[in-house]
C-alpha cells in the first residue's frame, strides 16, 4: 500500500459479482455479467510518529438482486462504498487504537487482500430489510386461513357468518 501511496495513481477495476463468493451467496440471482466497479487510492498523511501514515480510500458501486421482504419479488438494491482506512503496523496497535480512533484501521500486511476488504464493505452495505419503494403487486397477508388485504389492512369479521345464520333461522 505504501508503494501505491507514493505512486499516487489510483487503482480501478471491475470484478464479477460471482467472483465475490460471500456476496454472491447473499444475492437472489447473480447475472453472469453482474459486476462491481471499484477504485482504490492511497496517500501519505502526517502521523503521530516520525513516519507518515498510509491511508486508503476505497470506493465501489454495484446493484444486486435481493428478495423484497414485503411482496417476496426480486428487488434491485444499489450498493455503494466510500470508505477511508488508516494502516497501522501490527494487530496489537490496531486493537489498542481502535476504541479511540474515528477511522477504520487496517494492519499493514505484505499480502494485503484489497478485494476481501471490498467484499466485506459491500456485505455491510446490504440492506437489513430489502424492500421496493413501491411493490409492483400489493402483498397479500394471511392470518391463519383468512386473507388480509394489504391495501385496507382489514380482516373479515368472523361473526358476520354467524349473523347471516341467525337471520336464516328467524
Image (cartoon, rainbow, N blue to C red):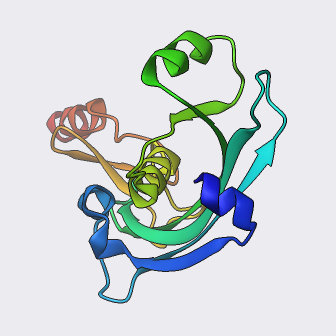
- The spot of residue 48 in percent (x, y) is 79, 21
When the figure is inspected, residue 40 is found, relative to residue 48, above or below; the finding is below
Instruction: Judge left or right: residue 77 versus residue 74.
Output: right
Which quadrant is the C terminus positioned in?
top left
When the figure is inspected, residue 30 is found, relative to residue 121, above or below; the finding is below
Q: Residue furthest right?
A: 46
Query: Can see residue 75?
Result: no
The residue under the point 62% across, 52% down is 2
The residue under the point 50% across, 39% down is 108
Residue placed most toward the observer, 40 or 18: 40
When the figure is inspected, residue 65 is found, relative to residue 46, above or below; the finding is below
Residue placed most toward the observer, 124 or 154: 124
Instruction: Judge left or right: residue 124 versus residue 144.
Output: right
* Snapshot quadrant of residue 167: top left
When the figure is inspected, residue 64 is found, relative to residue 26, above or below; the finding is below
- The spot of residue 121 in percent (x, y) is 50, 49
- The spot of residue 128 in percent (x, y) is 45, 42
Q: Residue furthest front?
A: 50
Query: Can see residue 73?
Result: yes
Which quadrant is the N terminus positioned in?
bottom right
Residue placed most toward the observer, 158 or 122: 122
Amino acid at each position: 500500500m505504501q508503494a501505491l501511496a507514493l505512486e499516487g495513481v489510483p487503482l480501478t477495476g471491475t470484478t464479477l459479482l460471482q467472483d465475490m463468493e460471500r456476496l454472491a451467496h447473499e444475492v437472489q440471482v447473480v447475472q453472469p455479467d453482474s459486476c462491481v466497479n471499484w477504485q482504490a487510492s492511497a496517500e501519505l498523511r502526517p502521523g503521530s510518529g516520525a513516519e507518515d501514515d498510509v491511508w486508503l480510500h476505497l470506493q465501489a458501486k454495484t446493484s444486486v438482486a435481493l428478495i423484497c421482504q414485503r411482496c417476496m419479488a426480486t428487488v434491485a438494491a444499489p450498493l455503494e462504498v466510500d470508505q477511508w482506512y488508516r494502516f497501522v503496523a501490527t494487530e496489537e496497535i490496531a486493537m489498542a487504537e481502535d476504541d479511540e480512533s474515528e477511522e477504520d484501521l487496517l494492519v499493514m500486511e505484505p499480502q494485503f487482500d484489497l478485494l476481501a476488504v471490498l467484499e466485506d464493505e459491500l456485505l455491510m452495505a446490504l440492506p437489513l430489510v430489502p424492500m421496493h419503494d413501491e411493490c409492483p403487486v400489493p402483498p397479500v397477508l394471511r392470518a391463519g386461513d383468512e386473507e388480509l388485504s394489504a391495501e385496507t389492512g382489514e380482516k373479515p369479521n368472523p361473526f358476520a357468518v354467524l349473523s347471516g345464520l341467525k337471520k336464516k333461522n328467524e
